[in-house]
Every structure is written in structure tokens, then in C-alpha cells.
């Protein structure tokens, strides 16, 4: 129900609460309200739930999971685990 | 697809799972609150990757599952009226009410339509001025801004034949109800990422302090969930009870301010009944006074419905993480997705349905 999926914003129209855009989910295009992501620009990835973009995906933060993995493994090497 | 595939990577998932096994020195019970996470955990077998000392409990985070049975009955009554077009998200259509579900109402000639977005329901109202169009406004904080916007726009545009049947619930009060229960066994929570994308995670700080439990805001893919569990276990092992954010690519501490503004404009906090659990104070949203004309319960005078749950269904225990679905005697026999006894067997995010789809052959022990 709270399923929300990332898609790429490929065009926008209107402004303010009326702002909307076309979002591509792996090639499937949907019209989405951008009322809640005024910062979103064409090319950004947005998280879409029931026709509304709720958040813009932060490219830098998106890598953190994998940086965390690297650091976690390094830490363990230092602490002398087998 | 970008931002999905890399977070389903089996190698990264296993690395987190191994790390959890290395740092967990004792038994810990962790609850994921969100049904989307339950679905992913069971589908990708995240729980099966975990070491035996970690137990995952599935929480009440499926709005479809906690919508009270009398609201389903009200929806069915509205759907059956010849002057009404009843609109709803698809997963509400098969939820059993006392006598029937919305699909059966439709089969008997009711105009019941599935919509993808509440704005589609508003469009249907504009296109059918001679009919009353009702939208079943169900959901957590994630869905509230969308439903609020439909009402807000209806008011702005002067659409008179549109109303919503509200069953909006909030996550933190449900978590507090679980933490406050004397038989609580949850040591840490995965906070639902998309709920936090909207409301932020400020609200969890007082809960983490008061009950001494860690909260980690977590995404929905297997690697996200395993990292979230790792972060909780690391806190538990070092005696910390803090709020951390695993899902920083989508969630900011303050959440989505414009979404919160429209939600607060249209809705206010009210007590709500949760199916299988009962009434929880301050646990839901209802329309504010200026928007009462959009309230379907008022418009159609729907007060005074009372209903009883099927005696066999133990979904209340399942929703609070007290029992696993396959411990229910009706699971997979008298209760299946085709003939569900309870709502948790209907929604793909309901724990019973997730177990039925992915864990059917398992027999509960004990
Ligand atoms: S298996 Fe069916 S009857 Fe049992 S708890 Fe789940 S929904 Fe209720």
C-alpha cells in the first residue's frame, strides 16, 4: 500500500500545486503530480506513490549503502577478525 | 532498473547478513512495521539469511489490513447505491466485510471502480456531475498527502459531488501501543522509509528515549532491510537506543514539508479503530471542520455501523507480531487469498498473504 517506486523525470509542465511531469519507470511512462517536490528537475529520479512524487532520490546518498559495506569490511580487518 | 536492482544484489545482501551474524552475541527481536517491508522480507527470504539469534516480527503496517470491518461495510453500502460511483485502490476491493466485499458489490451491479490515484477519483467526479463519487481514503502517512490533495483541489474547484470515506492511520501511535504493551518483546524497530519520506523521523526520538529502543529508518529492498537490521543490532550490542537513517537517499529528517502542509490543511489527528487491534488514541486522521462537506460518513449519514470479526481469524495477534501467520489454524486451509477470512490474507502486504504466496509449504512448529 505504501509501495512507492523510483522513476526518472523526463518532462514537466505547469507550476505550483498544479505542477506535474512524465516519469519513466523502466520505459513505462506515467503522469505524476510534482506538487510535493518543487525541487525536482528533468533527469532526477523521484519516488512515486499513488500518482504523487514524494521525494527526490539523492544521487550521493544513494551510494552510501555500498560505502558503508566497504567500511564495515575494512573495520573488521583492522579489528583482526579472520 | 536504477535504484532498484543494485539494492537487490545478492552478494551485498549476504555480506550484511554475515556481518550481522558476526556482531550478534545474543538474541534480539526486531520488528518491521511496514507491510511493504514484510512483503520484501518474505519474498526475498531476508529472514532466512539471518542468523538464528535474530527474530523478525511483522508489525501492523498494512493500512488495508487495519481498516475496521465496519468501514468495509460502509464502503459496500455506498458501492451498492445507484446514485454512487465508489472508487478505491485495488487492494481494498477483496477485503472481507461482514457480508460481502466490494468486488461482490460490483458483481451485483454496483458501480465500483479501481483507481490508481485519488486524483483519478476526482476526475471521475468532474466527468459525472449527476453522480456522487466517493473515494475510499485509506492509508498511512505516505498516502495522506495524495488524499489530502484530492480534497483540497475539490474544494478549490468547487466540485460538489466528491467525497471521501476516511480510514487514515498513523504509524508512531501504533508503535507506541506495541511498546507499551506488557508482553512486548520487540528490541528495535525498522521505521518505514516511505512514511518517513513524508513526515520525517523527528517523532521517533522521544520514543527511542522513553522505551530505550533503537529506530532505523529503512528502505524496501533486501540490501536496505539487511543494512537496517545490521544498524539496529550494532546499536543493541553497544547498548545504544538511537534514531538512525539507513534510507538517506529518499528520507530527510524533517520529511517533505509541502506534503505535510497540505495534509495538515485538510486533516486533523483523531482516535481511530484498528482492525484486529481496537481503538488507539490519536492514531488516525479525519477531515478538518472546513472540509466536513467532503466527508462521506457525514454526507451519507453512515453513523451507527457495528460489526464483529470472524471468530476464527487471529489477525490481531499477527498484526502485533505476537503470532506468525502459519500459526493460525485456518491458514492455507479455510483461509486463502481466494477466500480470505481476514484482511491480512488479502493485501499483498498483509503478512498472511505474503506467507501464503512465498511460504506455503512450511508447517508451523509448536
Ligand atoms: S490466516 Fe486468515 S484467518 Fe488466520 S490470521 Fe491470517 S487472515 Fe486471519
Image (tube, rainbow, N blue to C red):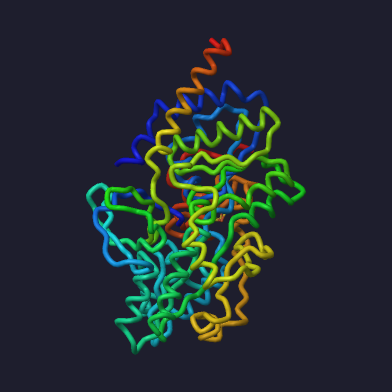
Residue B108 shown left or right of residue B355 in the figure: left
Q: Position of residue B118 (x, y in %)?
A: 40, 69
Q: Position of residue B71 (x, y in %)?
A: 54, 72
Residue B55 shown left or right of residue A28 in the figure: right
Q: Residue furthest bottom?
A: B130
Q: How many marks?
A: 0
- Residue shown at the point (33%, 87%) measured from the top left: B129
Q: Nearer the viewer, residue A45 or B294?
A: A45
- Residue shown at the point (41%, 65%) measured from the top left: B89
- Residue shown at the point (39%, 50%) measured from the top left: A56
| Residue B335 seen from this side | no
Name the quadrant of the N terminus of chain B. Answer: top left
Residue B231 shown left or right of residue B14 in the figure: right
| Residue B260 seen from this side | yes
Q: Position of residue B144 (x, y in %)?
A: 49, 64
Q: Residue furthest left?
A: A27
Q: Is residue B133 above or below residue B7?
A: below
Q: Nearer the viewer, residue A27 or B303?
A: A27
Can you tell me which quadrant of the image ligand 1 is in? bottom right
Q: Position of residue A33 (x, y in %)?
A: 35, 63
Amino acid at each position: 500500500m505504501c509501495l512507492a517506486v523510483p522513476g526518472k523525470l523526463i518532462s514537466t509542465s505547469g507550476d505550483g500545486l498544479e505542477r506535474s511531469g512524465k516519469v519513466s519507470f523502466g520505459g513505462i511512462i506515467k503522469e505524476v503530480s510534482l506538487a510535493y517536490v518543487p525541487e525536482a528537475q528533468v533527469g532526477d529520479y523521484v519516488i512515486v506513490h499513488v500518482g504523487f512524487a514524494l521525494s527526490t532520490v539523492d544521487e550521493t546518498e544513494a551510494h552510501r549503502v555500498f560505502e558503508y559495506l566497504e567500511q564495515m569490511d575494512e573495520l573488521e580487518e583492522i579489528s583482526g577478525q579472520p | 532498473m536504477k535504484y532498484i536492482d543494485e539494492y537487490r544484489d545478492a552478494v551485498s545482501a549476504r555480506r550484511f547478513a554475515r556481518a550481522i551474524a558476526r556482531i550478534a552475541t545474543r538474541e534480539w527481536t526486531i520488528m518491521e512495521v511496514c507491510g511493504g517491508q514484510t512483503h520484501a522480507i518474505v519474498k526475498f527470504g531476508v529472514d532466512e539469511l539471518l542468523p538464528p539469534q535474530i527474530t523478525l516480527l511483522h508489525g501492523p503496517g498494512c493500512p488495508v489490513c487495519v481498516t475496521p470491518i465496519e468501514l468495509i461495510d460502509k464502503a459496500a453500502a455506498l458501492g451498492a447505491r445507484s446514485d454512487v460511483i465508489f472508487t478505491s485502490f485495488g487492494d481494498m476491493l477483496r477485503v472481507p466485510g461482514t457480508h460481502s466485499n466490494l468486488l461482490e458489490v460490483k458483481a451485483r451491479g454496483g458501480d465500483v471502480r479501481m483507481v490508481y490515484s485519488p486524483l483519478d477519483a476526482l476526475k471521475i467526479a468532474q466527468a459525472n456531475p449527476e453522480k456522487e463519487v466517493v473515494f475510499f481514503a485509506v492509508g498511512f502517512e505516505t498516502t495522506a498527502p495524495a488524499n489530502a490533495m484530492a480534497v483540497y483541489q475539490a474544494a478549490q474547484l468547487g466540485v460538489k459531488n466528491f467525497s471521501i470515506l476516511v480510514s487514515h492511520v498513523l504509524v508512531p501511535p501504533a508503535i507506541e501501543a506495541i511498546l507499551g504493551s506488557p508482553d512486548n518483546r520487540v528490541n528495535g524497530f525498522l521505521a518505514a522509509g516511505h512514511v518517513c519520506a513524508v513526515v520525517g523521523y523527528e517523532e521517533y526520538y522521544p520514543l527511542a528515549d522513553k522505551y530505550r529502543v533503537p529506530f532505523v529508518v529503512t528502505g524496501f529492498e533486501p540490501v536496505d532491510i539487511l543494512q537496517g537490521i545490521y544498524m539496529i543490532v550494532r546499536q543493541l550490542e553497544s547498548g545504544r537506543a538511537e534514531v538512525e537513517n539507513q534510507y538517506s537517499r529518499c528520507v530527510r529528517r524533517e520529511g517533505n514539508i509541502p506534503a505535510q502542509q497540505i495534509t495538515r490543511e485538510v486533516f486533523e489527528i483523531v482516535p481511530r479503530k484498528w482492525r484486529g487491534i481496537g481503538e488507539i488514541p490519536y492514531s488516525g486522521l479525519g477531515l478538518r471542520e472546513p472540509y466536513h462537506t467532503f466527508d462521506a460518513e457525514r454526507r451519507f449519514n453512515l453513523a451507527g455501523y457495528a460489526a464483529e470479526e470472524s471468530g476464527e481469524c487471529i489477525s490481531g495477534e499477527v498484526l502485533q507480531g505476537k503470532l506468525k501467520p502459519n500459526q493460525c489454524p485456518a491458514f492455507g486451509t479455510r483461509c486463502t487469498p481466494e477466500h480470505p477470512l481476514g484482511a491480512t490474507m488479502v493485501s499483498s502486504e498483509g503478512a498472511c498473504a505474503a506467507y501464503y504466496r512465498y511460504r506455503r509449504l512450511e508447517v508451523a512448529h509448536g
